[in-house]
Image (spheres, rainbow, N blue to C red):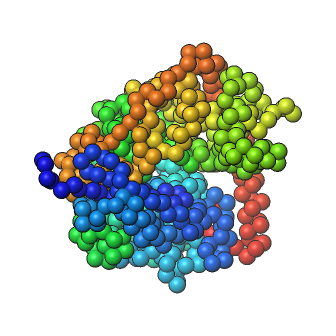
Amino acid sequence: MAGTPEQYTVGVDFGTLSGRAVVVRVRDGREMGSAVHEYRHGVIDERLPGGGSPLPPDWALQHPRDWCDVLAAAVPEALAAAGVSPAEVVGIGTDFTACTVLPTHADGTPLALTPEFAGRPHAWPKLWKHHAAQDQADRINALAHARGETWIHRYGGKISAEWQFAKALQVLEEDPEVYHACVRWIEAADWIVWQLTGEESRNTCTAGYKGIHQDGGYPSEEYLGALHPDFAGFARTRLEHPLAPLGSRAGSLTAEAAALTGLPEGIAVAAGNIDAHVAAPAARAVDNGRLLAIMGTSTCHILNSDRLADVPGICGVVHGGVVDGAFGYEAGQSAVGDIFAWWLRQGVPADYLAEAERSGEDLHALLTRKCAAQPVGAHGLVALDWMNGNRSVLVDHNLSGVIIGLTLDTRPEDVYRALLEATAFGTRVIVEAFENGGVPVTEFVVAGGLKKNALLMQIYADVLRRPVSLAASEQGPALGSAIHAAVAAGSHPDVRTAAAAMGRAHRHAYLPDPGRADAYDRLFAVYRDLHDHFGTRGDLLHRLRRQRNEARTSEFEGAGMAAKFVR
């Protein structure tokens, strides 16, 4: 209607290394302005802040104050960049990496921020990439199958070491004092909403995918008590809370949060969400069969369907977990962009660095240019993309990376391309698992920072033998959070309608080449043999991991590390 004032929402995406805010016009999803704030502490994986205790292998923590700093810095900066008056903002939505989870007191105060527990590693938020709870995950899975727990099949037959229950059981077994001081065990996605509204809330997405909440409840106290007697009441005492549907209003912005962010007091605060899942409406990927891959440091695969099926190795399936009325499936790869970055740190010699400086290219661009024209298979390499373990479909974070075919003639760009291809092969395993499980994939849509790499996207199209579409926004999760905020504020009736108005995608931006696809089929056959050999037929990689951890554990104990923090 002419003369109707414009409305805007703010979406805030809390990632692994930084948080970003975007101001979005509710009418059409136009992104008016954005800002990024880098976490001061980043990923805490060596020792606690302030020169505290060293951390054992496979640990990854974060600092809660870094998240609050994003609200204080990025939101006002995004508003200024947008040229939008705060009075025109009707809602704010947030999303988080998951499972990033923390223990708190009853009022939401993180134990990590209290003098009593600041020096205790288990008091700190465990980032999604904290993989030190694999032993606990293995026991959770074995007991679930032994008891015939029906919920285990909603998670592809295996709960991940990344999820809530494995991490909580690790705390109980390695630092029971922290566990018993924990009154609320809460996803960061819900904790940040608590900071905005002043009231605890829990959302259906994180509870379903990361908290084993299925068919109206958590695992039984009898089952949990069989894992550990003191674990029996875990869900009832530390998790239980009414669940807020996605797109619902979790509460209103408090005066304190308004002062922190520069937004008006009382505006709508949307229920929390997971970064990957919230990006689906931003990419218009809420329709059944459209598989959305959010590709960054890792990749999360989101797929809606009208059918419930047992798909081995997926991360989970939750009714209404992505959009109301559909079964939302999740799968993922624990490292993608992190693998490429690792190779740039380790495998690029001085003359390549000098060439990049002369040409004004970053190392990604340099290696991409050097390998882009290679015929498929010319490097003679195949790699397994398990440098951070395998999330799907093996669900084993004690696995590690493998590169075969190396010769004295192998060049840095050869390995780089093989690693690009390895992530595409890993995605193909996931796509085939969905389709073999009876859940069709009709389109492959990519969001996240890696969609800017044209070679990588073409490799995915060729390996998958299907078109690759691209989310139009560079801030997919943040835009998705803004879309959910528009629904929470009542500006759109539901997430599907809001996605149609505010989401954008470039359909079939990359098309498969039949000749390259044929060549990749042959390479994929080698990848699949390696995948099955190292992932299911033997324990070679597990033996290496055990020896590494034993050696590093001795090192930590020699440095005075308390034994109860080492497993």
Residue 263 located left or right of residue 403: left
Quadrant housing the C terminus: bottom right
Residue 2 located left or right of residue 83: left
Q: Nearer the viewer, residue 201 or 35?
A: 35
The percent coordinates of residue 249 (x first, y second) are: 24, 59
Q: Residue at x 41, y 44 (%)?
A: 473
Picture layout, residue 392 above or below residue 36: above
Residue 461 located left or right of residue 261: right
The percent coordinates of residue 30 (x first, y second) are: 33, 47
Q: Is residue 217 visible?
A: no
Residue extending farthest to the right is 408
Picture layout, residue 495 above or below residue 533: below
On the image, which quarter does residue 202 sit in? bottom left
The percent coordinates of residue 349 (x first, y second) are: 81, 46
Q: Is residue 458 visible?
A: yes
The percent coordinates of residue 422 (x first, y second) are: 63, 34
Q: Residue at x 51, y 75 (%)?
A: 112
Q: Residue at x 44, y 35 (%)?
A: 470
Q: Residue at x 75, y 55 (%)?
A: 548
Residue 262 located left or right of residue 561: left
Picture layout, residue 2 above or below residue 173: above
Q: How many marks?
A: 0
Picture layout, residue 221 above or below residue 348: below
On the image, which quarter does residue 290 sit in? top left
